[in-house]
């Protein structure tokens, strides 16, 4: 006798208990604290905040812990929480020119006001596994850093002062009013998008996907001749306008990574040649993401500059529809859900087709076969 | 920076009490409700909506869940099926979610339910006026596999330009002698929009036609909602010389003996043994309770012992 | 939500609306959804307290569907009483627009004067971007018999609401012919409920 499979609910409960046990791992080892994760796996936490689109190091650390270190799962956890939060205010645009710099480099000039500041970078480390990190405690290092200095001018502003690079005036409508930039988490996107909408999508987008696309532009799939005008990492003030007070008030600081790419120039009979811009801005320290985003942003401006759209990185619908890893992982992984009803439909058809093929083998006076040849011509 | 965390810590960790009834906040529900009204007014047209991130993955029913959460009231009785069955893991998971966040009564009985959320099937028992069936939709655009660009497909719908779809079906006939689409089989709704019925087997397409229930379709990842009002004409696309045909099974359900229902193929041993049983578990169970027995089934009274 | 201080903000202007918003909004939406899904049927709907000039069912519909993301047009009769706009803004946060064609929702208390064509019929590519109109009628019976057919209706359904424009059937034909564009209507009658008339249905005068 056959009894249909039952007990889905028990199976799910058991699976989740097992997951909780595996998450904890060997109980002889101390449990990770959120502080340890936030401090010692800071770049994981930064990525989760950036792609989770919610700046809160403790929540991101919790998500990393809960997800057993699976960062896309952690991003998903943070997003699902973010969506339930009330929107109380919009911040005024942050001023990255006023950033408290931790790192700042420009590939365009040997030296410049504010100088090159390497900061905490993997650059120039030799990628040799370090046995000193095996132990519990590490030697403290003498940092020899000076006090945080004044605001440092942005390289793009230096270029803009000489009109060498395109201006970055806010886009205004016919009445000289800057339209609301929109929010893809609240309203559906409709193509074509504005640059602001694209930048929002890219800022939330998957680092790996953007890295691959950015890389593809360097290899000729939508090449745009980039120079890393400037990469800066540091804290900026977040302010909100309070109508009651009549001015903006700071509510906190966030760490940002900003990348301004300087790309090959445009010009016309009306306009002298100018460099163009690609822009990347990411929560936390995430240089790879910011640089990739800047490359892809510039590639996606192809329509604006009347460039031929020939490469994936220039294709707005392709890039924006596929850059979100929470969407992507959900849909790819949904293939593991039962599909046996559809598969049964396909089984029936393929059995019919195979039977017809076997029955009709060697004969070509079959109506459908004849039709097939006709249509193929 | 830990203020939100502190707030969360004040709530017992297993308790979702600080979420609104049916999880979504009221402003989100209003936005979705406005989209549902437009979807009903333009049958088969995909209304873009501000789809939210849900606490389950995209592709696992987030669209259906958002629609259900927006229509569900405390008096409703909810049934959730996946592949026709109430006890598939994802159906169990979604049903638990609504029990938890909305506290609504749930059922496995098609007859008792006021709202049915489904993935891949329409129940065998004819739906009744006053019932609403909510479909989970992965790819709402029927033209998407022919033309990946939203800008292009939107123009095709606007111009009622569906030649491409007919070309595709015709190519199938040319290659295979049959239309090779067996599920998510495109339909034309109220004589205007070509619509994706979600990946239900084409066996279920005739049930969409002039159904007494309201059919709502939610695609979360793709941010679209569409609808078929009750008693609306729904025609499966076909050709005069290759009319639309539903899947047929050459045997009845092995457990309840039902004919003209959709069957699951179950592999019973390593030697290729097969049996065919109802995909609609509620239909199968109620038939067996009524005394119907298939060739491999046992009478209901005996099974209960 | 704060109001400009020069307005009269006495309690009666601002009071009313939903006292149990989650439940009441769901119930009212359920009625509105069924009204559009089953055109011609009367769906009962709970009235809310609202300023005297505002039909109370308009108040319910507003609290159910309007918020800061919507744009509402009020007909001259409703716009003539500042309490109405004030109440709408306070209760829902909706923007109020002065021109029919900009409106996502329109509320018409003087239904005899309505001109459907003045409102937004949406875009051929985005027919959802059209106005939903609420018309308050004095009665659901006694008016000219109108025979409705189309999606949501099993065979046909005849309604006879009193207080529609004399040329309503002609106006509707001109609206329906735009399909998939067009406006959608809710007829509301105090003490009765709502009837939905989506653009998809045909309406003919019965003689």
Image (cartoon, coloured by chain):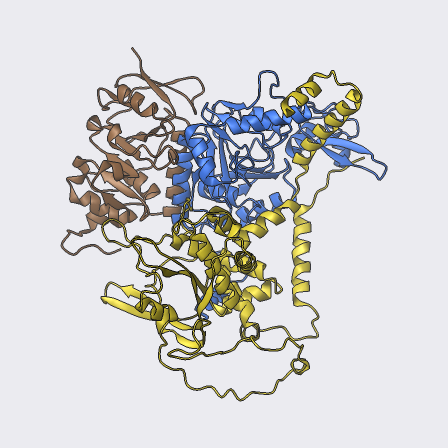
Chain colours: A yellow, B blue, C brown
Tell me the residue at 83%/35% (across/down).
Answer: B272
In screen coordinates, is A84 left or right of A369? left
Across and down, in percent, residue A328 comes to 56, 51
Q: Quadrant of the N terminus of chain B?
A: bottom left
Across and down, in percent, residue C188 comes to 29, 31
Image quadrant assignment for residue A74: bottom right
Of the pair B288 and A255, the residue shown nearer to us: A255
Tell me the residue at 58%/16% (across/down).
Answer: B240
Of the pair B119 and A236, the residue shown nearer to us: A236
In screen coordinates, is A120 left or right of C206? right
- A352 shown above or below A312: above
- B174 shown above or below B29: above
The outermost residue toward the front is A269
Tell me the residue at 60%/24% (across/down).
Answer: B170
Of the pair B244 and A80, the residue shown nearer to us: B244
Across and down, in percent, residue A150 comes to 35, 80
The outermost residue toward the right is B271
Q: Quadrant of the C terminus of chain B?
A: top right
């Amino acid at each position: 006798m056959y009894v249909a499979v039952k007990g889905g609910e028990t199976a799910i409960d058991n699976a989740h208990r097992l997951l909780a046990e595996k998450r904890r791992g060997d109980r002889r080892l101390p449990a990770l604290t959120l502080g340890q994760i936030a401090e010692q796996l800071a770049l994981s936490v930064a990525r989760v905040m950036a792609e989770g689109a919610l700046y809160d190091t403790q929540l991101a650390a919790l998500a990393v812990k809960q997800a057993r270190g699976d960062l896309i799962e952690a991003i998903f956890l943070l997003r699902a929480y973010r969506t339930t939060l009330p929107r109380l205010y919009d911040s005024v645009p942050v001023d990255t020119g006023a950033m408290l710099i931790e790192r700042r480099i420009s590939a365009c000039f040997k030296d410049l006001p504010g100088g090159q500041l390497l900061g905490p970078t993997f650059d120039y480390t030799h990628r040799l596994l370090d046995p000193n990190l095996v132990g519990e405690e590490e030697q403290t290092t003498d940092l020899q850093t000076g006090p945080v200095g004044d605001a440092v001018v942005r390289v793009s502003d230096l270029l803009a002062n000489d009109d060498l690079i395109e201006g970055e005036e806010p886009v205004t409508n016919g009445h000289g009013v800057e339209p609301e930039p929109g929010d893809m988490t609240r309203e559906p996107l409709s193509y074509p998008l504005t640059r602001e909408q694209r930048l929002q999508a890219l800022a939330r987008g998957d680092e790996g996907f953007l890295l691959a696309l950015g890389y593809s532009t360097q290899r000729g799939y939508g090449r745009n001749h980039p120079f890393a005008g400037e990469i800066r990492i540091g804290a900026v003030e977040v302010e909100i306008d309070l109508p009651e007070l009549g001015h903006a008030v700071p509510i906190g600081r966030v760490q940002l990574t900003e990348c301004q790419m300087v790309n090959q120039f445009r010009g016309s009979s009306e306009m002298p040649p100018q460099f163009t811009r690609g822009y990347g801005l990411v929560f936390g320290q995430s240089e790879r993401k910011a640089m990739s985003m800047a490359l892809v942003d510039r590639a996606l401006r192809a329509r604006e500059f009347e460039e031929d759209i020939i490469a994936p990185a220039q294709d707005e619908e392709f890039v924006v529809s596929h850059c979100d890893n929470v969407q992507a992982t959900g849909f790819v992984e949904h293939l593991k859900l039962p599909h046996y009803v559809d598969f049964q439909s396909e089984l029936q058809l393929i059995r019919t087709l195979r039977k017809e093929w076997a029955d009709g083998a060697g004969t070509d006076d079959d109506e459908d076969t004849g039709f097939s040849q006709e249509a193929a011509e | 920076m830990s203020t939100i965390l502190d707030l969360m810590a004040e709530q017992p960790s297993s308790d979702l009490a600080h979420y609104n009834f049916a999880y979504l906040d009221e402003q989100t529900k209003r936005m979705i409700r406005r989209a549902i009204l437009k979807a009903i007014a333009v049958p088969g047209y995909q209304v873009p909506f501000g789809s939210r991130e849900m606490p389950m993955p995209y592709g696992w029913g987030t669209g259906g869940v958002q629609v259900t959460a927006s229509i569900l009231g405390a008096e409703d009785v909810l049934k959730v099926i996946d592949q026709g069955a109430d006890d598939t893991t994802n159906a169990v998971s979604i049903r638990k979610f609504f029990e938890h966040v909305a506290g609504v009564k749930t059922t496995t009985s098609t007859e008792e339910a006021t709202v049915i959320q489904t993935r891949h099937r329409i129940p065998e028992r004819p739906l009744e006026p006053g019932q609403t069936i909510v479909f989970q939709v992965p790819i709402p655009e029927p033209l998407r596999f022919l033309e990946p660009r939203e800008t292009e497909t939107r123009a095709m719908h606007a111009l009622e330009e569906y030649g491409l779809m007919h070309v595709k079906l015709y190519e199938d006939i040319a290659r295979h002698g049959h239309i090779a689409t067996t599920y998510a089989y495109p339909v034309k709704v109220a004589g205007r929009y070509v619509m994706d019925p979600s990946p239900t087997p084409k066996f279920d397409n005739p049930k969409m036609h002039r159904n007494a229930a309201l059919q709502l379709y939610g695609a979360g990842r793709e941010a679209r909602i569409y609808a078929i009002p009750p008693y609306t004409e729904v025609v499966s696309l076909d050709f005069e010389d290759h009319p639309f045909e539903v899947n047929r099974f050459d045997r009845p359900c092995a457990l309840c003996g039902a004919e003209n229902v959709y069957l699951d193929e179950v592999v019973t041993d390593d030697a290729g043994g097969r049996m065919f049983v109802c995909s609609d578990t509620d239909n199968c169970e109620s038939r067996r309770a009524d005394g119907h027995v298939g060739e491999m089934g046992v009478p209901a009274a005996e099974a209960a012992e | 939500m704060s109001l400009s201080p020069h307005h009269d903000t006495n309690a009666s202007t601002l009071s009313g609306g939903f006292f149990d918003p989650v439940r009441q909004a769901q119930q009212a939406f359920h009625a509105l959804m069924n009204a559009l899904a089953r055109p011609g049927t009367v769906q009962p709907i709970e009235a809310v307290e609202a300023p005297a000039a505002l039909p109370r069912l308009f108040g319910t519909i507003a609290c159910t569907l309007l918020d800061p993301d919507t744009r509402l047009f009020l007909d001259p009769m409703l716009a003539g009483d500042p309490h109405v706009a004030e109440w709408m803004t306070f209760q829902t946060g909706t923007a109020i627009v002065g021109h029919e064609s900009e409106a996502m929702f329109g509320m018409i208390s003087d239904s005899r004067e309505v001109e459907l064509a003045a409102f937004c019929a949406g875009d051929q590519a985005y027919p959802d971007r059209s106005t939903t109109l609420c018309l308050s009628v004095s009665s659901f019976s006694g008016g000219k018999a109108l025979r409705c057919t189309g999606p949501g209706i099993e065979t046909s359904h005849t309604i006879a609401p009193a207080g529609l424009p004399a040329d309503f059937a002609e106006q509707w034909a001109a609206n329906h012919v735009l399909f998939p564009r067009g406006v959608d209507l809710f007829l509301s009658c105090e003490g009765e409920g709502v009837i939905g008339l989506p653009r998809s249905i045909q309406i003919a005068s019965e003689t």
